[in-house]
Amino acid sequence: MNEIRIDQHLDLKGVPCPLNFVKTKLTLEGMEAGSILEVVLDDGEPIINVTASVKEEGHQILKVEKTSEYWKLIIKKV
Amino acid sequence: MQKKNYTDAELQELRTGGIIKQKQKDYFILRTRIPGGHLKADILKKYSVIAKKYGRDYVHVSTRQGIEIPWIHIKNIPGLLKGFKKLGILRGACGPRSRNLIACPGSSVCRFGFVDTEQLAKKLDRVAFGKDVPKKFKVAISGCLNSCAKPQENDLGFQTQGEPSVDLSKCIGCTLCAKVCEKVCSRGKRESAIIMDENKRPIYRKENCFFEGDCIRVCPVNAWKIKKIGFAVYIGGKVGRFPKFGEKIADFVDGKKIPKIIENTVRCYNRIAEKGERFGEALGRQDLETIKKEIL
């Protein structure tokens, strides 16, 4: 597998909905189009809601990965 | 008699729908309807003008998505009713007639909605509203299984269902679809409709599906898409003193059939119910299979 180059990393462990999405959105707003953000999210509502909301905002989701008890979401800013 | 000063024409206006006597002498509530609850902001302003000028500077927002203007003196009613049409205000119903059709916000804004309930409600108002019936008759449309418009509590309710399908060539194996599905299905006491195979590819088992589209919403790469939209039909729901949920008589009914189903149900209600009886009460004496055939 070819590695994805991560431009920015956001650790949202323990951050509840909808604050986790707000932080993701704000971070994406500060990034260049085409750059890649990696977000770490809790299991349950956070990974489900943030994934759906990021998609609705029009960004491209490259990868969704479970790592032990957390989820990694890799987003390409549109 | 308190009404001796009013003309026949004025009294006739009071007998038709949407004018409700207050407990205070000579004062009435003007009930209006808003099909589906979608109201242009300009028309909303006109309510405000009427409430200020003829009422007591407030309105009551009903649970049936109507606006009621209280404290209207009887002498102002004929004039106000004449002006309603030009203002874009629609009269509501009371007495033995079918009521305002209610709906949720719908797919134009809601992330869960499968259909544009605003357009649907506007179209259906003509067949659903103001029909003569034994007691009252209420129709509701919900754009998804959240049931925000409470179709199960109405005499006739439509609940939109969406059947998903998956394009495995797009799937990235994230397993989120199975995760959201498991959550819904376990609440609904069913086995999951989506399970992952050993290669982390989803397998869809339609027989377990609640058709609410969580998999479509969560899928990060749009591998899950909507395949078919239809309506579950509920009949005989009511609240009041003796509440009961409507009975589901069909799944995935085509949207084009809704006007006919409303007409059939109103006719059926008039046929089977006694005066003053609700549809759900009359249904208790009927064979449901026969009724289904009559309505669908």
Image (tube, coloured by chain):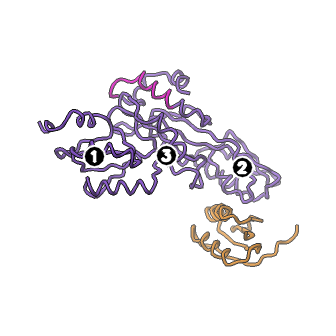
Q: Label 3 belongs to which residue? A: B103
Apparent side of residue B134 relative to residue B251 in the rendered image (left or right): left
Q: Verify whether residue B270 appears in magenta.
A: yes
Q: Residue B84: x, y in percent?
A: 36, 46
For the C terminus of chain B, the image quarter is: top right
* Magenta-colored span: B262-276
Check the residue under mark 3 and report the chain it is in: B
For the N terminus of chain B, the image quarter is: top left
> In whole angstroms, how far apart are the C-alphas of marks 2 and 3?
24 Å
Front residue (pair B110, B239): B110
Which chain is orange in the picture? A
Mark 2 vs mark 3: give the one in front. 3
Q: Label 1 belongs to which residue? A: B29
Tint applied to chain B in the drawing: purple
Front residue (pair B21, B82): B82
At 30% across and 46% down in the image, what residue appears? Answer: B80
First-in-chain label (2 vs 1): 1
Q: Are marks 2 and 3 on the same chain?
A: yes
